[in-house]
Image: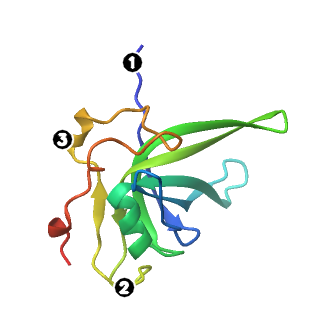
């Protein structure tokens, strides 16, 4: 059976990222993203505003860029895949759906939402990394294989 797992989100960061490194030295950060939806109620005709809060995990250089340039309130575009985390605590089974970010685009103008007011930055896996990417490389095991697909520092325009 064929399957497809792709998520594209555009929203605002709900908290400052906390960058950390796993034992292999790979950077990882978790961010919260608030995604707003506005629609008209079919019965009353009134506009309804709804916010969905999504947890996103970023790896490698993408995580480092987020740690350096992303702050609470920053507008952000994330492309990634859904991942279901399951665990047991006190005999109770728990689960949570999150997004593993594979590409990140900082949005907004200079000085808007970033710590340094630097230009927008795109980070994520390149097409070449797709061959080495494995879904088994997740938050609990390891980051996506390869270089993280992020452009080298020389490719970033600042």
Residue 126 percent across, percent down from the top left: 22, 47
Q: Which residue is mark 1?
A: 2
Residue depicted at x 46% and y 52%: 23
Helix, strand or loop for disc 1: loop
Q: Position of residue 62 (x, y in %)?
A: 35, 59
Q: Residue at x 54, y 72 (%)?
A: 16
The location of residue 119, given as percent across then percent down, is 27, 78
In terms of depth relative to the viewer, which is nearer, 46 or 35? Answer: 35
Q: Which mark is residue 129?
A: none
Return the residue found at the far left.
Answer: 154
List the single residue furthest toward the right: 90
- Name the mark on residue 116: 2
The answer to whether residue 13 is left or right of residue 76 is right
Residue that badge 3 annotates: 128
- Graded by Cα atoms within 10 Å as few (under 14), some (14 to 19) or many (20 or more), the crowding at tag 2 reads few
Residue name at image x 37 percent, y 75 percent: 108
Q: CA distance from mark 1 to mark 3?
A: 22 Å
Precedes in sequence: disc 1 or disc 2: 1
The CA distance from mark 3 to mark 2 is: 31 Å
Mark 1 is surrounded, within 10 Å at the Cα level, by few (under 14), some (14 to 19) or many (20 or more) other residues, namely few
Q: Is residue 128 visible?
A: yes
């Amino acid at each position: 059976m064929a399957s497809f797992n792709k998520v594209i989100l555009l929203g605002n960061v709900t908290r400052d990222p906390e960058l950390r490194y796993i034992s292999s030295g790979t950077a990882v950060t978790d961010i919260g993203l608030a995604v707003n939806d506005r629609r008209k109620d079919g019965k009353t005709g009134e506009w309804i505003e709804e916010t969905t809060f999504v947890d996103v995990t970023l790896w490698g250089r993408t995580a480092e860029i987020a740690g350096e340039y992303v702050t609470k309130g920053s507008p952000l575009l994330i492309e990634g895949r859904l991942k279901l985390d399951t665990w047991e605590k006190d005999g109770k089974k728990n689960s949570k759906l999150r997004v593993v970010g594979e590409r990140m685009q900082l949005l907004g103008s200079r000085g808007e939402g970033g710590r340094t007011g630097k230009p927008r930055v795109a980070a994520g896996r390149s097409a070449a990394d797709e061959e080495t990417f494995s879904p088994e490389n997740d938050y609990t095991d390891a980051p996506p294989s390869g270089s993280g697909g992020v452009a080298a520092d020389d490719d970033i325009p600042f």
